[in-house]
Image: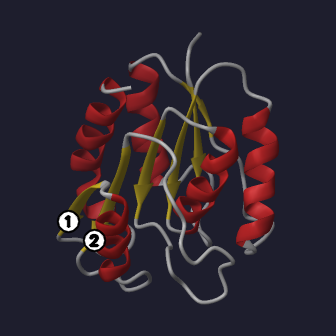
Amino acid sequence: MQPTIFFAHGKESGPWGSKIQALASVAREKGFRVESPDFSETFDPETRIRKLLYLAGQAEGPLVLVGSSMGGYVSTIAADQLHPIGLFLMAPAFYLPGYAHQNPLPVTNPTVIIHGWNDEVVPVDHAILFARRNRTELHLLESDHSLTSHLPFLQVLFGNFLDRL
């Protein structure tokens, strides 16, 4: 059965921002189904986790979770119950004040993290700490939080990630 990719956007972005559009095109080319729910009705990460669990829990077949910023946190926490075949995280919002899970664990392999050295929202040290603790693949780019300055490279990384699934 064809795997479904669920994208989880960041706190103040939307379900079809430039990163998601770029990665969704790669996914479709490789035969994946793509879902990108709109989480913008709330800034509460726990509410977003519940929504992702509900929506992705109804999908048939294997799941892949992709998250950006708060969506990376949401995808990682939801992965514990959804058991995806892969987790692709861009500038994940780990170890931030007010988030319920201060030591999230990736429950799937592969887990890939991409983070910008110049991230002004989530310190790069948070991604390094998570990757070190969990021995996950980590790519650090000369970019800011949005990572949009590296869209073609993100597409290459994402394509390679999907090829391994």
Say which residue appears at 46% left-offset and 66% top-offset: 92
Q: Where, by quadrant of the figure, is residue 1 drawn?
A: top right
What residue is disc 1 on? Answer: 141
Say which residue appears at 73% left-offset and 74% top-offset: 43
Q: Above or below — where is 38 with respect to 12?
A: above
Q: Image check: 103 left or right of 135?
A: right
Q: CA distance from mark 2 to mark 1?
A: 5 Å
Q: Residue 11, percent across and down?
A: 62, 71
- Name the amino acid, label 2: Gly
Q: Image check: 84 left or right of 142?
A: right
Q: Residues within 10 Å of mark 1 (few under 14, many from 20)?
A: some
Q: Image check: 24 left or right of 119?
A: right
- Name the one closer to the observer, 96 or 36: 96
Q: Earlier in the sequence, mark 2 or mark 1?
A: 2
Label 2 close to label 1 by CB (< 8 Å)? yes
Say which residue appears at 48% left-offset and 47% top-offset: 20
- Name the one closer to the observer, 104 or 50: 104
Say which residue appears at 32% left-offset and 35% top-offset: 161
Q: Residue 113, percent across and down?
A: 34, 57
**Kind of element beneath mark 1:** strand
Q: Quadrant of the C terminus?
A: top left
**Kind of element beneath mark 2:** strand
- Name the amino acid, label 1: Leu
What residue is disc 2 on? Answer: 116
Q: Residue 126, percent across and down?
A: 38, 78
Q: Where, by quadrant of the figure, is residue 81 drawn?
A: top right
